[in-house]
Amino acid sequence: MGEVTKAVILMGGPQKGTRFRPLSLEVPKPLFPLAGSPMIEHHIESCKKVPTINEVLLIGSYQYDSQIRDFVYHMMKEYKLQVRYLQEYVPMGTAGGLYHFRDQIARVVGSDTSNFFVLNSDVCCDFPLNEMIALNQETTNGMGFMIMGTKAPPDEAVNYGCIVTEPGSTKVLHYVEKPETYVSNIINAGAYLFSTEVFKHMAQVFDEHHKNDLAFPKDSISLERNVLPGLVGTSKLHVYLLNQFWSQIKSGGSAIHANRFYLSLFCKYNRDRLATNFEDHATILGDVRIHPSAYVDKTATLGPNVYVGAGVRIEAGARVKESIILDRAELKEHCCVLYSIVGWDSVVGEWSRVEGHSADPDPNDPYAHVHSGSLFNKNGQLNPGITILGRGVNVSREVIVLSTIVLPHKSLVHSKKNQIIL
Ligand code: GTP
């Protein structure tokens, strides 16, 4: 039986996260704040709930700059875990980095049989890590491989990795990444529990790639395409089926949903992180988190599902709903911000309206997910989505900005609809 002592978070790198621009130009996507905490802090908080985990490794191809260094330092202090960033010299794919750093992942003092989690950074859910350990124990005496799955409507499932299980069992019989036609409505939800035996399978793939010159860059391996199908052959790959909210975070629109979900988790587990209504303070509707250094006028109304960052200033009569207001932004008197992300240091003028299109998944389908397809339709027009103001954008007074993406440091003096402002 292998004890689970580590978790690895796959961070990607600057080449990834293109659908998250312009926000990912300013901050590595895995550090973008959702409900006020960097995206992968939610993952680390879930790891902290597994008593045997003592180390979290972050693997990515971002430069180890002050943003990542400060984050690592803060996580170690806050969660009393060993946290380390391991930098890939080039993006090595979802398994290439795991294989490259296998010695660091497998190294546990006094044991070589430890198990470890692998979590995609761009997945949002209440990670059921203890439940995955329990199922791994039950199915393979803790010696197998486990993948977190969720269900998706058939027409959406083909956009993900699809999993076929033995009827009435959790055993995986077949795995295919983004199939051309419908295979199964159980999809790969981007979290895994592996024993270190997985490295033997990665070694086979790696050797084959090298021998036949199959991969570019030559050390890159895809977990989904190259490794998981091989694990199926061991009969030790099982699926833990998630029965709650799950979303990928690919676009700004999905960040609004993830923000909403993590605020709802705070409401369940950490109510003290959320704002409450006090006499002579701003009106708070539903789940709202406000950084202690932000100023919010008592006649403003916030919520539901709003995060207000550090040093933000929200003036009299402003209305904010389903939005993320990033550090030091200013919302002037009587402006209205709905379904939008307002970038760091941006200003929304008096009586202006910044509004996005919500694109909520079908409320009647419990397994419908936030779809982060292409930004454009087939005629090359921008699909209606949330409004994103990049860093340092200035929206003049009485301007209306609808479903528009505005690149950093632009000034808008006229109203805009369904555009990208370059
Ligand atoms: P897309 O639909 O193309 O975005 O694919 P996907 O949803 O299957 O995601 P993808 O395989 O690109 O990434 C899954 C996770 O692995 C994400 O958290 C990425 O940030 C991360 N990831 C992807 N490629 C790499 C890589 O080369 N190195 C590392 N360390 N992480 C990666």
Image (cartoon, rainbow, N blue to C red):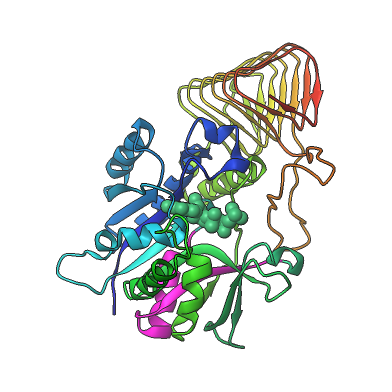
In this rendering, the count of numbered labels is 0
Report the front residue among 404 and 293. Answer: 404
Viewer-closest of 252 and 37: 252
- The residue sitting at 61% across, 26% down in the picture is 390
- Left or right: where 17 falls relative to 319: left
Horizontal and vertical percent for residue 177? 60, 68
**Residue 188 quadrant:** bottom right
User: Is residue 223 shown above or below 255?
Assistant: below
Answer with the quarter of the image where residue 155 lies.
bottom right
The location of residue 84, given as percent across then percent down, is: 29, 48
Which region is colored magenta?
Answer: 127-152
Q: Position of residue 189 (x, y in %)?
A: 56, 63
Vertically, is 342 above or below 155?
above
Q: Residue furthest right?
A: 379
Please check the rendered image and state whether residue 301 is part of the magenta-colored stretch, yes or no: no
Residue with the most extreme bottom position:
167
